[in-house]
Image (cartoon, grey):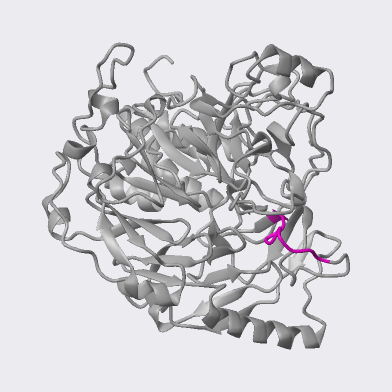
Amino acid sequence: MPSLSDIPVEVLLDNLLPTLEVKDLLSLGSTSKAFYEIVTDDTFWKLKCDRDFNFNGKKTARTSGWIIIYKGLSKPKCYVWGNSDNGRFGIRHTPKVSTGKVPYPVLLNVPGSKRIVDLTAGGWSMHFLDSLGNVFITGTLDGEMFSLHSDGFSVAAKVAPEPLRLELPNPVKTLSCGRKHSMALDSAGDIWTFVSWGRPFRLITPAFDRTSPESTIVQVECGWTYNCALTASGEIYVWWPFGPVLRQIYELKMHEMDIERTKDAHATDLGVIPCVTWDLEHNPSRLPGLPRLPALEHPNLQTEAQTQIKIVKIAAMDNILIALTNVGHVLRFGEISDESSLAQGRWQYLPYFSDTIEIVKHRAFSDTTEGNTGLRSPTDVQITHISAHFNHFVAYSTGLDSIVLRGSTETQEDNFAEIIPELQYKSVISVVLGDYHSAALTENGKLYTWGAFSQGALGLGDPKDIEVGQPGGFSSQRHRDAARSGLRAARVPDVAVPTEVRFDHESKKKKDRFCFAVAAAGWHTGALVIDLDPDDDEEIAETEEEEQEEPTQTMPGHYPEQDPNIPIPILHHGPGQVPLMPRVGLRPYRIGYAGRGRGGPGQ
């Protein structure tokens, strides 16, 4: 008689197992070694995170630990730190510190949300995405202008001092932020642009009709002042919300809505911004095709990839776009400051960010002079991920031998990458960039920051509480003593070496926590964290958690969820390790420039 074990594994993983409750999955895994290996498959739990919680991890290079993420997504915690001006953190009270604004992570409660699973940052704002595809915002889109108390969120400068939900037609899958605008890709495949949170527009164009790979969007990214989208076939389209063409259309529409005086998008008492959506018809500009590229040899690379090279990821900076191919070529396109500049733009292949032979020529790998032993040279570097913001970009590979390469808007085809030794071979899965600070997330849930203090954007703690000379601390005891005495604090030195961020500054005891997502922009940072201590319910910061009714709306493809009050019976054996399950037979408001920083990356 046929049994469950006779069903092909692919059918089980794709069709049957996703419909089961977690407790049933665990029971199935305890029946045999074969089923144990199936139900602990990382790819399966990654898909389940996406289906049940709207978390796909596409912003990171994570390849393992998905069962830990799934367990923690029942109650993730959101932390923010750095410059809190313009209400960008949505917190009622900021800690009393010697210098800066919020120099260490503080807990943010997002009322009305159903588990925050992603976050992204703008010049003066934060955006949060929950497991149902709801978008919550704090701060303001335009911190260089002012708004009146009577204004609604049709005004870009309107401040959200606490988290507010954007009321949109469809659940959102992906968010991206520029300096003064943001963008969302929803579950219907529509692209929404926010120049103000109250009046977003949907881009209508035949180029994105979703009838073929050439017209199906797989990634959207905000540059400093532009938007770009990547199709499944590898085509890149660009448009400028603040450019002369779209700006004229936008201002005419805003004038029309202003006359009606019923479309100001005031926030409701329930914390909702009723967005007044509208359609904008425009054909974005398509970037030219790739130039002829050299072959890159990688042991695990399939032959057809070399003959069918296409762009698979994009990252946007200030007037420059970075692209990555399926083979690992990193390219630069610029400039794209506006429609008129596009014709002069061109692709440049960056060999020192792509080719292992060229990468190992860097002095970080070859310098063995006294006092510098040099890093072990990598034998195979295949770049799989890129990120960018303002003036810098990062290209990195994955796994235990991960290599992280940093460039800037000034990087040309004959320039070496900047290499920070302490980031190499650390299983880095995500790198995010602020204006003058950076953060790197590793596979085992550790978060490291470096760069300018930027009002506390590094999150390393109050400088007066850090030993002199240590990362995040003052450079002399005199400066530290002055800060402790309440005198005006001296400048906090930049941090050159990536340093781990703690998430228990306001806890009563030290906590073991696992960071799974991070965002940075301007002078601020945010992260999503999972508690690894099962009894962790203590937090001195903002913890007014309210009991929320179960929402009736669900994401497309959503399956019944595990009750968050019933713990998933998985035994955890430390960050980054795959948990074990029982199995048979075995033992068990700042005015000015958030990014242009005319005064530099000061305090």
- Front-lying residue, 598 or 148: 598
- Front-lying residue, 31 or 296: 296
Q: Give the x, y percent position of residue 23.
A: 53, 36
Displayed quadrant of residue 72: top right
Residue 569: say if magenta: no
Residue drawn at the location 83% of the way across and 43% of the way down: 92
Q: How many marks?
A: 0
Q: Main secondary structure of the magenta part?
A: loop
Q: Give the x, y percent position of residue 130.
A: 62, 52
Residue 139: say if magenta: yes
Q: Give the x, y percent position of residue 455.
A: 68, 37
Q: Tell me the quarter of the image containing the N terminus.
A: top left
- Front-lying residue, 77 or 454: 454
Residue drawn at the location 46% of the way across and 56% of the way down: 317
8 sits to left or right of 449: left
Q: Give the x, y percent position of residue 441.
A: 48, 34
Q: Is residue 43 above or below residue 319?
A: above
Residue drawn at the location 39% of the way across and 76% of the way down: 285
Q: Is residue 344 above or below residue 444?
A: below
Residue drawn at the location 33% of the way across and 43% of the way down: 4
Which span is picked out in magenta?
137-147
416 sits to left or right of 432: left
Q: Say whether residue 80 is visible.
A: no
Q: Is residue 395 above or below residue 204?
A: above
Q: Say whether residue 502 is visible.
A: yes
